[in-house]
Image (cartoon, rainbow, N blue to C red):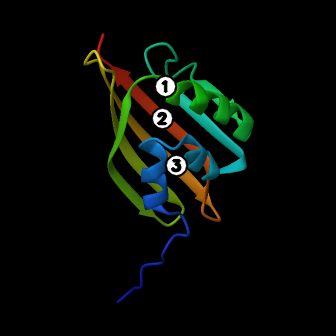
């Protein structure tokens, strides 16, 4: 019988970050991380791509400055990969759903692709 290897990536820390602590969330990214965002304005053939923690930090600062709730609904970590879903809601009831797939190195996110959709 094989033995599952435990990833140094911490899903509980990811949950704390996603649900309202952008500094904690940023700490999970490697310095050279890349974040690719796909949505109705940044479509698959031309995604928004952020390079490095500074660019990712600016995006997180913008997102978490908005009056909205964030809830991590599911998370799977296996080896050097992690995936999670996130449900967000603005006070007026507009909802956002995000799905993320990440590649990990030494417990840090190196590549993150996020697909998001929201009520219109």
Mark 3, secondary structure of its residue: strand
**Is 45 or 89 nearer to us in this picture?**
89
Q: Could you tell which of marks 2 and 3 lies nearer the N-terminus?
A: 3
- Residue located farthest toward the bottom when viewing the structure as drawn: 1
Mark 2, secondary structure of its residue: strand
Q: Position of residue 29 (x, y in %)?
A: 64, 49
* Circles 2 and 3 in contact, beta carbons < 8 Å: no
Q: From the image, which quarter does the N terminus lie in?
A: bottom left
* Circles 1 and 2 in contact, beta carbons < 8 Å: yes
Q: Position of residue 25 (x, y in %)?
A: 55, 47
For image coordinates 39% across by 85% down, the residue present is: 2
Place residue 118 in its image quadrant: top left
Q: CA distance from mark 1 to mark 2?
A: 6 Å
What residue did someone put label 2 on?
Answer: 114
For image coordinates 60% across by 36% down, the residue present is: 35
Does residue 2 sit above or below 12 in this rendering?
A: below
Mark linked to residue 38 = 1
Mark 1 crowdedness (10 Å alpha carbons): few <14, some 14-19, many ≥20: many
Does residue 38 sit above or below 29 in this rendering?
A: above
Mark linked to residue 102 = 3
**Is 113 or 19 nearer to us in this picture?**
19
Mark 3 crowdedness (10 Å alpha carbons): few <14, some 14-19, many ≥20: some
Mark linked to residue 79 = none
Mark 2 crowdedness (10 Å alpha carbons): few <14, some 14-19, many ≥20: some
Q: Is residue 12 left or right of residue 88?
A: right
């Amino acid at each position: 019988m094989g033995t599952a290897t435990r990833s140094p990536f911490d899903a509980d820390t990811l949950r704390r970050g996603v649900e309202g602590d952008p500094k904690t969330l940023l700490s999970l990214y490697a310095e050279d991380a890349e974040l690719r965002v796909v949505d109705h304005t940044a479509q698959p053939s031309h995604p928004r791509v952020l390079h490095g923690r500074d660019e990712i930090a600016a995006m997180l600062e913008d997102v978490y400055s908005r009056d909205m709730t964030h809830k991590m609904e599911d998370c799977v970590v296996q080896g050097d990969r992690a995936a999670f879903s996130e449900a967000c809601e603005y006070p007026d009831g507009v909802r956002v759903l995000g799905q993320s797939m990440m590649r990990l190195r030494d417990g840090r996110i190196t590549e993150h692709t996020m697909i998001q959709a929201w009520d219109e």
